[in-house]
C-alpha cells in the first residue's frame, strides 16, 4: 500500500471518530444557565477527547515524515504511566483522572522539537 493511501485512510478514520464524538454529545435539560453545570465533567471529557484526537493527528503527520527523530524520550515513557494512573483513579475521583489526562495532553500539545529540527534540516 502506498504511503499516501495509508495517510488518507487514517485521516478518514479520525474524521469518523470526531463525527461519532460530536454525535455522542448531549444537550443539557433546562433553560437556565445552571443547567449545564451537572454535565461539566462530561463536557470536559469531550474537550479532552477532541484535544487528544487533534494531538494524535498532528503528531502522526510529523512522525510519518521523520520517525527516526524520536527515540526513547521522557514524554513517550511518562504518557502511558499518566494514562494508566488516570484510568485507575477514575473509579474513585473522576476529576483527578481528567486532570491527569489534561496533563498528558499538555505534554503532547506542541510537537516534539527533535522532529521539527530534523524536518528543518531535511532537503526539500
Image (spheres, rainbow, N blue to C red):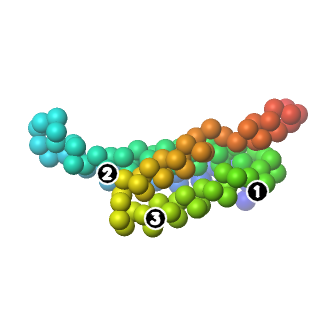
Residue 98: percent from left, percent from top: 42, 52
Name the residue located 70 percent from the left edge and 52 percent from the top edge. 74
Name the residue located 66 percent from the left edge and 51 percent from the top edge. 75
The answer to the question of whether label 3 and label 2 lie on touching residues, with beta carbons closer than 8 A, is: no
* Most foreground residue, 42 or 107: 107
* Most foreground residue, 83 or 20: 83
The quarter of the image holding the C terminus is top right
**Lower position in the chain sequence, tag 3 or tag 2:** 2
Alpha carbon distance from label 3 to label 2: 16 Å
Residue 42's label in the rendered image is 2
> Can residue 21 be seen in the rendering of this structure?
no
> Can residue 63 be seen in the rendering of this structure?
yes
Residue 21's label in the rendered image is none
Alpha carbon distance from label 3 to label 1: 23 Å
Residue 94: percent from left, percent from top: 36, 58
Residue 84: percent from left, percent from top: 52, 64
Question: Where does label 3 land, which residue?
Answer: 87
In the displayed structure image, the side of residue 57 where residue 66 appears, left or right: right
**Lower position in the chain sequence, tag 2 or tag 1:** 2
**Is residue 30 positioned above or below 123 on the image?**
below
**Lower position in the chain sequence, tag 3 or tag 1:** 1
How packed mark 2 is, by other alpha carbons closer than 10 Å (few <14, some 14-19, many 20 or more), is: some
Question: Where does label 1 land, which residue?
Answer: 72
The answer to the question of whether label 3 and label 1 lie on touching residues, with beta carbons closer than 8 A, is: no
How packed mark 3 is, by other alpha carbons closer than 10 Å (few <14, some 14-19, many 20 or more), is: some
In the displayed structure image, the side of residue 19 where residue 2 appears, left or right: right
Name the residue located 36 percent from the left edge and 53 percent from the top edge. 95
Q: Tag 1, which secondary structure?
A: loop
Please name which of the two marks, 3 or 2, marks the residue nearer to the observer: 3
**Is residue 104 positioned above or below 84 on the image?**
above
How packed mark 1 is, by other alpha carbons closer than 10 Å (few <14, some 14-19, many 20 or more), is: few
Name the residue located 82 percent from the left edge and 51 percent from the top edge. 68
Amino acid at each position: 500500500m502506498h504511503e499516501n493511501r495509508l495517510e488518507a485512510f487514517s485521516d478518514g478514520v479520525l474524521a469518523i471518530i470526531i463525527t461519532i464524538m460530536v454525535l455522542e454529545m448531549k444537550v443539557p435539560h433546562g433553560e437556565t444557565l445552571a443547567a449545564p453545570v451537572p454535565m461539566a465533567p462530561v463536557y470536559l471529557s469531550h474537550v479532552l477527547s477532541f484535544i487528544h484526537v487533534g494531538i494524535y493527528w498532528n503528531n502522526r503527520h510529523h512522525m510519518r515524515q521523520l520517525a527516526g527523530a524520536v527515540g526513547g524520550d521522557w514524554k513517550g515513557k511518562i504518557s502511558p504511566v499518566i494514562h494508566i494512573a488516570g484510568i485507575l483513579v477514575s473509579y474513585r475521583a473522576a476529576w483527578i483522572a481528567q486532570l491527569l489526562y489534561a496533563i498528558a495532553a499538555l505534554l503532547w500539545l506542541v510537537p516534539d522539537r527533535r522532529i521539527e529540527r530534523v524536518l528543518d534540516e531535511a532537503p526539500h
